[in-house]
Image (spheres, rainbow, N blue to C red):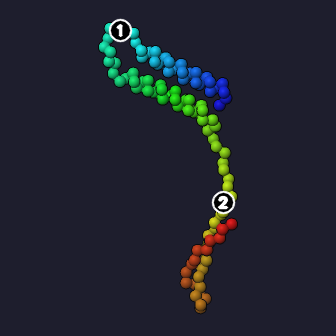
């Protein structure tokens, strides 16, 4: 994200928050002062969207480069086990590291 997109996103978030605060601060109107919890839910959603946008804008790239390390490779095979008469009596797992 370029610097201009970040600044536009921040300005839009600030404008949205400012509008929400000004809209909720009413003047001397002839109605009850208690408006319920509905305005708080709307302000919470707007605030969450604004904060989420700011976090996404400051995160930079969404993709990371793959990290390849020299990790040893372990390869295992099954090997037959013989008794002294040459008969197969089972299998054994033999592993080697490359």
Q: Check whether the beta carbons of the residues at disc 1 and disc 2 lie within 8 A of each other.
A: no
Q: Is residue 91 above or below residue 44?
A: below
Residue shown at 35% from the left, 24% from the top: 37
Q: Quadrant of the N terminus?
A: top right
Mark 2 crowdedness (10 Å alpha carbons): few <14, some 14-19, many ≥20: few
Q: Earlier in the sequence, mark 1 or mark 2?
A: 1
Looking at the image, residue 63 sits to the left or right of residue 23; the answer is right
* Residue at the limit of the structure toward the bottom, as seen here: 85
Return the residue at label 2.
71
Question: Under tag 2, what secondary structure?
Answer: loop
On the image, which quarter does residue 38 sit in?
top left
Numbered mark located on residue 77 in the image = none
Mark 1 crowdedness (10 Å alpha carbons): few <14, some 14-19, many ≥20: few
Numbered mark located on residue 29 in the image = 1
Residue shown at 66% from the left, 50% from the top: 67
Residue 21 at what x, y percent from top left?
46, 18
Looking at the image, residue 25 sits to the left or right of residue 98; the answer is left
Question: Under tag 1, what secondary structure?
Answer: loop
Residue 25 at what x, y percent from top left?
42, 15
């Amino acid at each position: 994200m370029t610097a201009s997109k970040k600044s536009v996103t921040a300005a839009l978030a600030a404008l949205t928050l400012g509008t929400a605060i000004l809209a909720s601060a009413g003047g001397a109107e002839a109605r009850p002062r208690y408006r319920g919890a509905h305005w708080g839910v709307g302000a919470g959603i707007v605030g969450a969207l604004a904060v989420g946008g700011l976090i996404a804008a400051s995160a930079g790239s969404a993709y990371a480069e793959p990290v390849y390390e020299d990790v040893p490779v372990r390869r295992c095979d099954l090997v037959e086990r013989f008794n002294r008469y040459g008969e197969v009596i089972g299998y054994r797992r033999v592993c080697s590291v490359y």
